[in-house]
Amino acid sequence: MIHWQVIIPLVVFLVLIFGIGIWANRQVMQSNSFLQEYFLGGREMGGFLLAMTMMATYGSAGSFIGGPGVAYNTGLGWVLLAMAQLPAGYFVLMILGKKFAIIARKYQAITLIDFLRERYQSKTVVIVSAVSIILFLFASMAAQWIGGARLIESLTGLNYSAALFIFAGAVLIYVIIGGFRAVALTDAVQGSVMVIGTIILLVATVIAGGGISNIMSDLVAENPNLVSPYGADRSLTPLYVSTFWILIGIGVIGLPQIAVRAMSYKNSKGMHSAIIIGTIALATVMFGMHLIGVLARPVLPGVEIGDKVMPLLTLKVLPPYLAGIVLAAPMAAIMSTVNALLILVSSTVVKDIYLNYIKPTASDAQIKKASFYVTTVIGIAVVLVALRPPDLLIWLNLFAFGGLESVFLWPIIFGLYWKTGNKYGAIASMIIGITSYIYIDQIMPSVLGMHTVTLPIILSLVAFVVVSLLTKDKVNTGKSII
Amino acid sequence: MNDKRFKIAHREAIIGVILVIINFSIWFGFAYGMGSGDPSSYTYVLGFPAWFFYSCIAGTIFMVILIVFVIKFLFTEVPFDDEESEHK
């Protein structure tokens, strides 16, 4: 079934996004420092842009499609879990904060790996970082793309492959031609759409359910555990919930796509307002979308596939034109995550591998060409993988989250704040982080009732500190600027 | 190298850690402190179970207010480029 009235607002949204891409492309072509412009938007973001691009990059298919679906089946406990994400709005910018901005400028770093390379002076650190960024972000891009295509599939009645090509084509074009500036500007539009869409749908759902009290008593009548912090089947134990906090609350510092944004802003004033705007926007979206999932249960009972809760609910409680606007929100969330990942993976290949090790003497024209080509090839490769997708969207997503955090969290933090931390510590931390993460994920996912990511983060912390102290005399930190 | 901007940066990073600890205590404390009883005997605030209202709604609003306060009064603006900035 095709809902034309729903599709029109979506098309308008896409056209707007394209316009931004084309405008950004003109900036890219005029810039005298192509790399800095294409991969970092010329380091000029102000507060609103910075806040929105962080929130939009962080908020993904999981927050708009997967998350509400799980909340529908789990109850208020899942909203509680989702609110662990609140620190992502302020903690990253406060911790990386000014120090990262100052040092990134001193090093003239354009990518996160630039910073790690200058700080640790180690080829191994660069290679391990590059490989984990490419692998993990490739996987999460594919997951996002699958989510996007499924959404278009369910809204338009097109088949999955056609939906995937439309969606991927839309994102690829503006990212390839516009670079980071297009990504950040479209993120601002997409972030705003996410916030507005969430508020509209939340209000409409509460009204459709006859008010909060009414909905809550329906939930209690069905299963009282739906309104408890333990979740419908009482599986959300305090230990699990508190360790989950590490993954989605504070470990976010270790996500390269987030960290790179902490070096792209113009001045400290921008950063200050970004912390406030970002926290409010993130809180609204995370709280709103997950609560919507719970409230949907009495309003729209009996939905069997979690991922369909949000689209079906929207079509049920809103008039068609408004539904189109609200359904642009998950599209925006997916696009804004994919575009950030795509430009990051591309910068890793072009700047960190090609320019460092393959062709350090490349001319500006060659770099330009390589950047456009690499971005295109990666984008198309992800589409091909997504054509025959593996099933579990959230799992893929969280696997990438946890893996990247185990690799990058401590090398970034100690790289900034601990002079004695050195390359041996960083290498040990990265390798132990990633291997223990994969091992624990495969062998005993929730060891002792904790979230999978907990132990790898502790182990990589220990590895970093112990190895750095043991090799203290081997590395000269005398002229370090930390 | 002793950059005096780093002193400000370090102080603000510590403030970030304190905020996140406060955030965690409110969020986790209210949720499992008030919500661990029998779900059918919960008290309700504005339609929501009390644990949920304090942990996820009031707690979040409190954090936002606290963050605004901290940014306005405790954070300092610093220039990012070096004083002897030779590049653009």
Image (spheres, grey):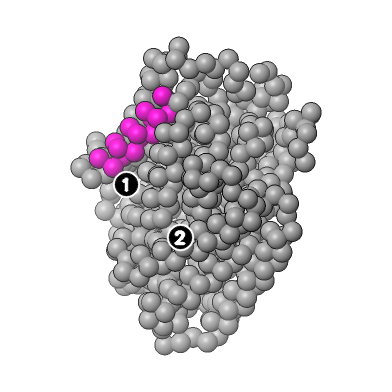
Which tag is nearer the camera, tag 2 or tag 1? 2
Residue at 31 percent of width and 69 percent of height: A388
Quadrant in which the N terminus of chain A appears: bottom left
**Residue A472, percent across and down?**
45, 14
**Residue A89, percent across and down?**
57, 45
- Looking at the rendering, the stretch of residues picked out in magenta corresponds to A424-439
Residue at 52 percent of width and 61 percent of height: A373
- Residue B48 appearing in the image: yes
Look at the magenta stretch and give its main secondary structure.
Answer: helix
Which secondary structure, mark 2?
Answer: helix
Q: Callout 1, which amino acid?
A: Leu
Q: Say whether residue A72 is magenta.
A: no
Estimate how packed mark 2 is, as few (under 14), some (14 to 19) or many (20 or more) residues with alpha carbons within 10 Å: some
> In the image as oriented, which residue stretches furthest toward the left?
A443
Residue at 49 percent of width and 86 percent of height: A3
Quadrant in which the C terminus of chain A appears: top right
Given contact means CB atoms under 8 Å apart, are the residues at marks 2 and 1 in contact? Answer: no
The mark tally for this picture is 2
> Looking at the rendered structure, which numbered label has been put on residue A378?
2
Q: Which residue is mark 1?
A: A236
